Amino acid sequence: LAVCHWGLYSLATTTEMVAAILYWSLEYPTDNKSLTWLNIGSHGVVAFLMILVGTVVDTVPVKLQQLWILMLYGCMYSAWTYLHYFLEIGNPVRVNSGEEDDDAIYPAISWGNDPMWAAIYCAASVLVLIPLCFFMVWIGTRLSGHARVLEDSQSLQEKDKDEDEQKDTPTRGDLEMHIY
C-alpha cells in the first residue's frame, strides 16, 4: 500500500508541476493583467503545497523506477488530447464561444488548427518536461533526508525478513546431519 502511495505521489506532484509550467507559459492570457486566486492557486500553489507536504510532512520517497509511470501517463494524456479532438467531444468552457476550434482541451494543443505544434508540445512534455519535473521532485525528496530514512527503514525491514526466511531454510549441513 505504501508503494502505491509513493507512485501516486510522484505522479500527482510531477503532473501538477507540468500543468503549472504549461499553463503559465502557454495558456495564461497575456492581455489580461489581472491575476485571480483561481489561476494562482490551481496553477502553482497546489504544486508547491504538494512538494512541501511530500518532502517535509509525509516524507514520501520518490524512486527513479517511478519515472516510467509518468512517461506512460504523459503518452496516454497526449493520446487523449488527440482522441478528444477526433471524437469532437468539445470543451464546455469554450463551447459556442465563437472560437474556431472549441474541441481542444487547451488552445495550445489544438489538433484541429495546428497539429504540428500540438504534436511538438505533447512530445516535449513527455520527453523533456515530465522527466525534468520528476527529477526536481526526486532531488527534493533526496535533499529533505526524511524520505531516505523511511526508505532505509523499509529496506532494513525487507533485509530482516529475508534473514528470517534464510534461518528457516535448512542448510546442506543440516540436511547431511539428518541423513546420517
Image (cartoon, rainbow, N blue to C red):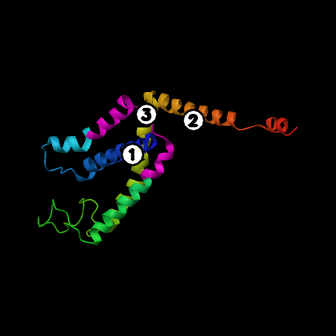
Q: Viewer-nearest of labels 1 and 2?
A: 2
The vertical placement of 68 against 109, above or below, is above
Identify the residue under disc 1.
8
Q: Which disc is residue 88 wearing?
A: none
Give amino acid for label 1. Answer: Leu
User: Label 3 amino acid?
Assistant: Thr
Cα–Cα gap, marks 3 and 1: 15 Å
Which amino acid, mark 2? Glu
Picture coordinates of residue 60 (x, y %)?
A: 41, 35
Q: Please give the count of numbered marks on the rendered protein.
A: 3
Q: Does the CB distance between marks 3 and 1 fall below 8 Å? A: no
Residue 114 visible somewhere in the drawing: no
**Would you say the magenta stretch is mainly helix, strand or loop?**
helix
Query: Reading the chain from its start, which is encountered first: label 1 or label 2?
Result: 1
Q: Residue at x 57, y 30 (%)?
A: 156
Q: Which residues are magenta?
A: 46-70
Residue 141 bears which disc, if any?
A: 3
Residue located 42% across and 41% down the image: 6
Image quadrant in which you'd find residue 103 = bottom left
User: Residue 65 magenta-drawn?
Assistant: yes
Q: Which residue is mark 2?
A: 158
Q: Badge 2: few (under 14), some or many (20 or more) residues near its Cα, within 10 Å?
A: few
In front: label 2 or label 3: 2
Q: Where does the image place residue 111, in percent across and percent down from the top left?
A: 29, 67
Residue 54 image offset from top left, x and y in percent:
37, 35
Q: In what element is the residue under mark 1?
A: helix
- Residue 71 vs residue 27: left or right? right
Q: Residue furthest right?
A: 180
Instruction: Give the image quarter of residue 37.
Output: top left
Q: Secondary structure at mark 3?
A: helix
